[in-house]
């Protein structure tokens, strides 16, 4: 298939596919007239790339998944290098969640203090005015 068909079937743009190619993730063949020609395996690779990008992986993280697919595996996460990336990414997400939890607790405490200060100020104002 030509680049336009691959882009349409993959739900992306031809520009994006050319970018993936420059990054070494997508490998077209060249026809006699110089057109990029892709087979069905490249469609699977592009789907894998897009799925991983959608959950926060960057293109360098995606390389082992693409290599795994190119090695003939049905899934890009079947290889040890892919599993290592998944573990690292999960650890990053866990650390981020821990930081978000700490921020949430701090905001909760700050809000509780602000409400308490407001109620205390209103109480004192009512008692001094009355």
Image: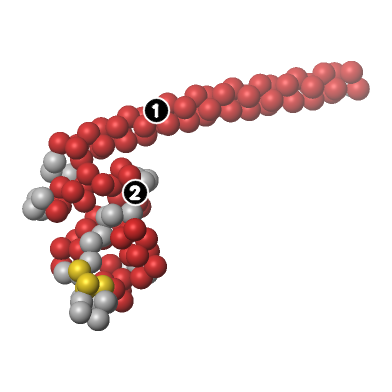
Q: Position of residue 3 (x, y in %)?
A: 29, 73
**Residue 3 appears in the rendering:** yes
The image's colour scheme reads: secondary structure
Image quarter of the N terminus? bottom left
**Residue 9 appears in the rendering:** no
Quarter occupied by residue 32 = bottom left
Picture residue at 79% right of the left edge, 22% below the top: 121
Looking at the image, which is closer to me, 126 or 77? 77
| Mark 2 or mark 1, earlier in chain | 2
* Residue for badge 2: 59
Q: Position of residue 11 (x, y in %)?
A: 32, 68
Q: CA gap, disc 2 to disc 1?
A: 21 Å
Which residue is outermost to the bottom? 33
* Residue for badge 1: 95
Quarter occupied by residue 115 = top right
Q: SS of the residue at dot 1?
A: helix
Picture residue at 74% right of the left edge, 25% below the top: 118
Please determine whether, in this image, residue 78 is positioned above or below residue 28.
Answer: above
Q: Position of residue 22 (x, y in %)?
A: 34, 58
Q: SS of the residue at dot 2?
A: helix
Image quarter of the C terminus? top right
* 114 sits left or right of 81 in the view: right
Quarter occupied by residue 20 = bottom left
* 39 sits left or right of 86 in the view: left
């Amino acid at each position: 298939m030509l680049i336009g068909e691959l882009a349409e079937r993959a739900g992306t743009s031809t520009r994006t596919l050319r970018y993936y190619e420059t990054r070494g993730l997508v490998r077209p063949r060249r026809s006699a007239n110089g057109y990029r020609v892709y087979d069905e395996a490249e469609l699977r690779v592009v789907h894998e790339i897009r799925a991983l990008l959608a959950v926060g992986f960057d293109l360098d993280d995606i390389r082992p998944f693409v290599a795994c697919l190119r090695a003939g595996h049905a899934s890009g996460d079947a290889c040890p290098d892919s599993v290592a990336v998944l573990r690292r990414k999960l650890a990053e997400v866990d650390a981020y969640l821990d930081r978000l939890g700490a921020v949430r607790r701090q905001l909760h405490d700050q809000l509780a203090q602000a409400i308490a200060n407001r109620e205390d100020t209103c109480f004192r104002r009512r008692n001094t005015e009355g």
